[in-house]
Amino acid sequence: MQRTTFITAIALLAATLASPGFAMGDDPLSPPVISCGNGVPGGVNCLVSKTQLKEARGAFRAGMKLKDHRRLEEAFAQFDTASRMAPQNMQFLTAREVVKAQLVFNHIERGNTLLLENSRAQAASEFRAALELDSENQYAQDRLVEAVSIRSEEHTSELQSPCNL
């Protein structure tokens, strides 16, 4: 009887440890740790003073107005301020991420248009701007490589053309 209980306990422990929930750091969707103004890391454990919360709400309201007026860069800065002051507030964090996604999309869209117009340097600049906001964006990385590689190929062919020799 004790042997069966022991084997069952070991099997249960092995199954629990093998589950992805116990694997530390393997969750690619885990949110980034945000440090509070009081030095306590993590959004849930933050102790936000009433003054900080009031300032965060003000920054959020300013960000909403800026977003409504299509001033996305400034709105992003306000939402970022709000989400850093009150990291446990999902509304602030969500607004920041939505505007960030819009900014990344706009940069990529402008970059694609510039590539079609054969303005490789400006296209590369737009793709770099997208990557500054979202360094993990594989599409922006690929488009930047394409813009830079085609540009360097054109430069090499200009140097090798018979007119330049």
Image (cartoon, helix red, strand yellow):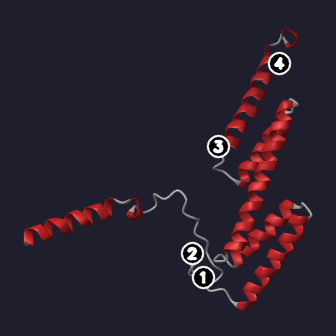
Q: Secondary structure at mark 3?
A: helix
Question: What amino acid is found at the position of numbered circle 1 in the picture?
Answer: Cys
Left or right, 29 with respect to 48, comes to: left
Tell me the quarter of the picture where residue 59 sits. bottom right
Residue ID at (84%, 11%) = 165
Question: What amino acid is found at the position of numbered circle 4 in the picture?
Answer: Glu
Q: Would you call the spot at circle 4 few (<14 residues within 10 Å), some (14-19), or many (20 or more)?
A: few
Left or right, 10 with respect to 110, comes to: left
In space, the residues marked 2 and 3 are separated at their CA atoms by 27 Å
Mark 1 — residue? 46
Vertical order, 96 against 26 (above or below): below
Q: Secondary structure at mark 4?
A: helix
Q: Are marks 2 and 4 in contact (CB under 8 Å)?
A: no
Could you tell me residue 71's position as x and y percent?
89, 61
Q: Decide which of tag 2 and tag 3 comes sooner along the chain.
A: 2
Mark 4 — residue? 158
Q: Nearer the viewer, residue 82 or 20?
A: 20
In space, the residues marked 1 and 3 are separated at their CA atoms by 33 Å
